[in-house]
Amino acid sequence: MRFLLGVALGIATGLAAYLLLSPARKEDIKRRLQGMTGGQEPHLLQPLRQMAEDAASQARQAWEEARQAARQAEQEMLQRYQRLRHREDERRR
């Protein structure tokens, strides 16, 4: 009985999340808000949008820096490995 109740609650939660978070629903809400404000973004949302855009820009920049650092670290490790391998080959000769 608990299992069936859990499954029913899970399905209900998933359906509610789908309805609330679906792209079509977001567009509908966005159109309603624009209709209420005359097509312009409310003044209260402008600073929040700017902060979100700044945060997204910083995240993209940080991700790119992390990728570059990973590439550089990989190249350095490969060079170290090749030097060590070369030294071992020379010692064996």
Image: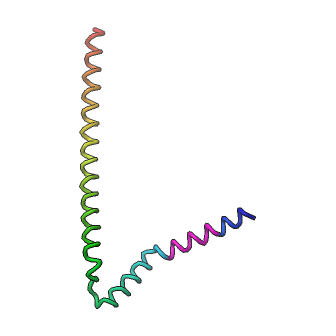
Query: Residue at horizontal 26%, vertical 16%?
Result: 87
Question: On the image, which quarter does residue 51 sit in?
Answer: bottom left
* 6 on left or right of 28: right
Foreground residue among 91 and 67:
67
Image x and y of residue 1, in percent: 75, 64
| Image height of 6 relative to 87, above or below | below
Question: On the image, which quarter does residue 83 sit in?
Answer: top left
Count of picture labels: 0
Q: Name the residue at the top extreme.
A: 93
Query: Residue at horizontal 71%, vertical 62%?
Result: 3
Foreground residue among 79 and 3:
3
Q: Locate the C terminus and report the quarter of the image it occupies.
A: top left
Q: Name the residue at the front extreme.
A: 44
Q: Name the residue at the right extreme.
A: 1
Foreground residue among 77 and 13:
13
* In the image, residue 17 lies in the stretch drawn in magenta: yes
Image x and y of residue 67, in percent: 28, 47
Query: Residue at horizontal 29%, vertical 20%?
Result: 85
Applied colour scheme: rainbow
Q: What main secondary structure does the magenta stretch of the protein show?
A: helix
Foreground residue among 40 and 84:
40
Query: Residue at horizontal 24%, vertical 70%?
Result: 50
Task: State the extent of the magenta-drawn residues as a range.
Answer: 9-19
Image x and y of residue 48, in percent: 29, 72
